[in-house]
Amino acid sequence: MRIKRIVVGALETNCYIISCEETGEAVVVDPGAEPDRVLRETQGLEVVAIVDTHGHYDHVGANGQVKEATGAEVWIHPSDGNMLTDGNLNGSAMFLGVPVTVPPADRFLEEGEIRFGRLSMRAIHTPGHSPGSTSLFVDGHLFCGDVLFRGSVGRWDLPGGSFGELMRSIAEKLLPLGDDVVVHPGHGPETTIGWERRYNPFLTDGTFVV
């Protein structure tokens, strides 16, 4: 497995290209902006899916261009599906002052396996930052969108967010994956489950109750 991280857009979103080195098949996770840069990094690969961890504009903004260039399907959890075509729901109208929309999803992403090449990536529904936030787990690596960051957690004050759901998602679905798991968040540097369990103030300040 090969992982490429591309930091895109004004909010410095982490877009990831995950590929099977044996077959060249790849998945693009969260192409939030700068489609030309994203597509450059996919040269020589067969992109089989564009997977959005959630529907906020800074994670989906280049869906259309990447889809058009590669022919790949766009996948997202059904609870965030409407965000792709509604600038009020995806936050662009509020934060940019102009609604940004992208093409609708081709397939709704439920919990389960996504197979590409010889890799099997597990989709884990982790609501709280948004209703449909989904984390992706493959070969000891977790791509969690805006659920968990190094030393912090995702916002829960946006429409559809919930602090209780966010913390339950982390406690019940992410922490049990194991301390050695490498966490690739939607913004900022990578971390590990073990580091977050020990040092993340949201998980260690004595108020971590789910």
Image: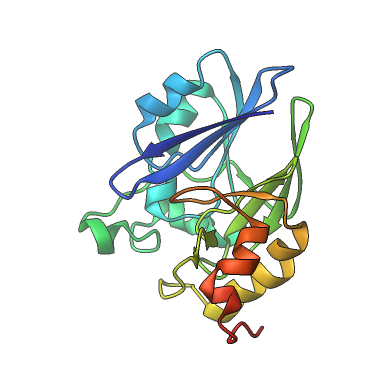
| Quadrant holding the C terminus | bottom right
Q: Quadrant of residue 40?
A: top left
Q: Is residue 127 visible?
A: no
Q: With 191 as the anchor, is 40 left or right in this view?
A: left
Instruction: Tell which of 123 and 63 is nearer to you.
Output: 123
Q: With 100 as the anchor, is 159 left or right in this view?
A: right
Q: How is the image coloured?
A: rainbow
Q: Position of residue 30 (x, y in %)?
A: 49, 43
Q: Position of residue 87 (x, y in %)?
A: 34, 57
Q: Is residue 128 above or below residue 116?
A: below
Q: Position of residue 185 (x, y in %)?
A: 52, 51
Q: Which residue corresponds to the image point at 40% horizontal and 30% vertical from the top-left? A: 65
Q: Which residue corresponds to the image point at 44% horizontal and 48% vertical from the top-left? A: 59
Q: Quadrant of residue 23?
A: top right
| Quadrant holding the N terminus | top right
Pick out the residue farthest to the left. 97
